[in-house]
Amino acid sequence: MRQGKFYEGLAQLRTAVEANDKLKYDEPPGWMIPVRHSLGATLMAHQRYAEAERVYRKDLTPLPNNGWALFGLSEALLLQGKNSEGLALRNDFKQAWNRADLTITSSCLCQPGPAAGSGEKGL
């Protein structure tokens, strides 16, 4: 992706998500940065908000209070103009993230980006 090969990189991220879904549960996880968060952040960075929304919703199925995915989904919704649901999820994110010592502007540290909404630099 950093070489400008967006579609090839996107295909590799989707393949990585499929492979990650087949991994057996382990603690600590075999891969520390969830691949769906990388995929969602990449889609967001390329203004593909509806696709990112689907990625984050899928990620929240097994872990409904995951702060990273809540943040990404909230941003994806807000950037699509789905403000009521986006703001509600932003509140869910703030509750899930209330003890964190890290301010985030993306669902993945691999893709820092501006927060949507009221011009906040991060949440």
Image (tube, rainbow, N blue to C red):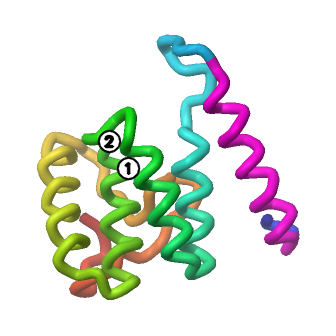
103 up-or-down from 75: above or below? above
Residue 59, above or below 63: below
Stretch in magenta: 4-23
Rendered residue at 80%/57% (across/down): 11
Mark identifier at residue 41: none
Q: Is residue 28 left or right of residue 15?
A: left
Q: What residue sits right under mark 1 in the picture?
A: 68
Q: Quadrant of residue 2?
A: bottom right
Q: Amino acid at mark 2?
A: Asn
Say which residue appears at 22% left-offset and 86% top-offset: 118
Q: Give the alpha-carbon distance from disc 2 to disc 1, as whole Å.
A: 6 Å
* Residue 63: image location, x then y, percent: 34, 35
Indicate whether residue 15 is drawn in magenta.
Answer: yes
Identify the residue at horizontal 15%, vertical 66% (top origin).
Answer: 88
Circle 2 sits on which residue?
A: 66
Q: Position of residue 37 (x, y in %)?
A: 52, 50
Looking at the image, is 54 positioned above or below residue 69?
below
Question: In x, y percent, where is residue 93?
Answer: 22, 54
Q: Amino acid at mark 1?
A: Trp
Left or right of residue 122: residue 96 = left
Disc 1 packing (10 Å; few <14; some 14–19; many ≥20): many
Image position of 77 with respect to 92: above or below: below
Q: Which element type, helix, strand or loop, lies under badge 1?
A: helix
Tell me where residue 72 sits by quadrant: bottom left
* Pointers 2 and 1 in contact (C-beta within 8 Å): yes
109 to the left or right of 93:
right
Q: Secondary structure at mark 2?
A: loop
Quarter holding the N terminus? bottom right
**Residue 18: within the magenta?**
yes
Dominant secondary structure of the magenta stretch? helix
Crowd rating for badge 2 (residues with CA inside 10 Å; few <14, some 14–19, many 20+): some
**Residue 4: quadrant of the picture:** bottom right
